[in-house]
Amino acid sequence: MKDVLPTLKAHTQRDYCQYFKLLDAVSGELPIDSIHPFDVAEYVRLRGEASKVRANREKAFFSTLYNHARTWGYTDATNPCIGVKGFKEKARDRYVADDEYAAVWAVAHSTVQDAMDLALCTGQRPADVLKITVADIADGKLSIRQNKTGKKLRIAIEGGLTDVIARIMAKPRDKVNKALLQDTDDQRLAYWAMRSRFDKAREESGVNFLFRDLRAKAATDTQDLAHAQSLLGHKNRTTTEIYTRDRKGDLVRPLNRAVPTK
């Protein structure tokens, strides 16, 4: 946590800090060689009663910790996570309908409204949306370097994106702070501030979807796989197909068959 964590990406650091607190509470005082596959399996089983996805993520994190311990000479034991199965995860297939989006947007804080519109128009991940600066806007294009893959994109500023950026820039803002999305204190809009306000808007509207579902909505609403692949910055078309598949379902024609009339 002292040497490795600071070298990782911001969202990974956030997740790992959460995982570490739980794992430390359970096994932080145990001698490392006393932890066996059964102990890991039992943790996964019990943790899965609350969240199967988190159980899988925390097991993977524990495996990473143990591998570092082996590398640094704290133990010669086999990683106890090996052979311990996690839970099968189903890919998200949640499609956010326009009326659902509008319902959350209508009651959301203005900073969340801006973030939602920017995420939907660009199809980018929350972290990439929050890090956009005014300097990224030039020559009618929005330049983005994705955190997760390092992929560089230039998105044409046209249509709805033009209106969104113009609305954001028209608000009172700190000219020294170059962040495009600024909070009411003129600082860059922080992830957790956006997340808590978004959650509040979901609760108030009665509509339940994740902020990251907007990326899939953007891809699906293009109705063009090649366009979606370019917008999301996917290297392979197959990745985009998996990402958009089953979100809305295929549009098919009914059987053209004569039916009796009264």
Image (cartoon, rainbow, N blue to C red):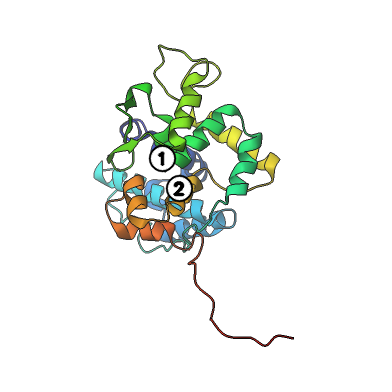
Q: State whether residue 153 is above or below residue 63.
A: above
Q: State whether residue 199 is above or below residue 190.
A: below
Along the line of sight, the residue nearer the viewer: 142 or 174: 142
Q: Residue furthest bottom?
A: 260
Q: Amino acid at mark 2?
A: Ala
Q: Amino acid at mark 1?
A: Thr
From where the camera sits, is residue 189 visible? no
Along the line of sight, the residue nearer the viewer: 2 or 186: 186
Along the line of sight, the residue nearer the viewer: 74 or 79: 79
Q: Residue furthest front?
A: 262
Where's the N terminus, which quadrant? top left
Residue 117: horizontal and vertical position, in percent? 50, 36
Q: Element at badge 1?
A: helix
Residue 131: horizontal and vertical position, in percent? 39, 29
Per the image, the residue denoted by label 1 is 122
Q: Residue furthest right?
A: 262
Residue 215: horizontal and vertical position, in percent? 45, 46
Circle number at residue 218: 2
Residue 167: horizontal and vertical position, in percent? 50, 25
Circle number at residue 256: none
Where's the C terminus, which quadrant? bottom right
